[in-house]
Image (tube, grey):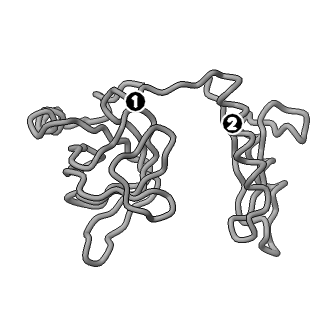
Amino acid sequence: GLKIIPVINKIDLPDADPDKVKTQLSDNGLIAEQWGGKTPVICVSAITKKNLKELLEHILIVASLLELKSNYETNPVGTIIESHVESGIGPVATALVEQGTVRTGTYIAVGNTWGKIRLIKDWKGNRINEGLPAMPITIAGLKAVPSFGDRFIGVDSEKELKNIITNKNPSSTIKS
């Protein structure tokens, strides 16, 4: 029941085949609007910035039509979209905040690791104090590198964090 906007990247490459990807999407029930379906499929190039404005417009239109709102005051919840070890910093993860507000000092449980956020950067690499819903943020302070797709939940105290960790399943405490 979720609205999805598939994005096909790297269309600037000579061997790019967006129609092949659209075929794969249609095989999974997502028929592109360009083919008479209801799924907006946007072809972009991050290098040339082609269609990025169109992608942002589609996201805003869908959010407006569905009247999507997020709760800023609840425990932060989101998904890890990239992670690695950065020299001098340690485990670093890029996350999409779905609800709540991630702040410096927030304790988070994510996948098989946990930590206390000591650094937050925005998508431009600027240091910030908090990450709001719909924001991609880069965080540091985890004990280990989480996996792509891991869900996270943030809490205000180490006691709450220990309670989540002892349950051994942080995702079970994540409410959508």
The image quarter in which residue 173 lies: top left
Q: Position of residue 123 (x, y in %)?
A: 50, 58
Local packing at callout 2 (Cα closer than 10 Å; few below 14, some 14-19, many 20+) is few
The residue under the point 24% across, 60% down is 144
Q: Quadrant of residue 34?
A: top right
- Residue 105's place in the image compared with 138, above or below, is above
Q: On the image, numbered disc 1 is attached to which residue?
A: 72
SS at mark 2? helix
Label 2: which residue?
A: 60
* Amino acid at dot 2: Leu
**Mark 1 residue crowding within 10 angstroms, few (<14) / some (14–19) / many (20+):** some
Q: CA distance from mark 1 to mark 2?
A: 19 Å
Relative placement, left or right, of 164 versus 173 is: left
Q: Position of residue 14 (x, y in %)?
A: 82, 75
Q: Quadrant of the N terminus?
A: top right
Q: Residue at x 76, y 53 (%)?
A: 21
Q: Amino acid at mark 1?
A: Tyr
- The picture places residue 20, in percent across and down from the top left corner, at 80, 55
What percent of the width, then of the height, locates residue 174?
33, 29
Asked if the residues shown at circle 1 and circle 2 are in contact, with their CB atoms under 8 angstroms apart, the answer is no
Q: Mark 1 or mark 2: name the one nearer the start of the chain.
A: 2
* Residue at 25% over, 77% down: 88
Q: Is residue 66 above or below residue 160?
A: above
3 vs 109, left or right, is: right
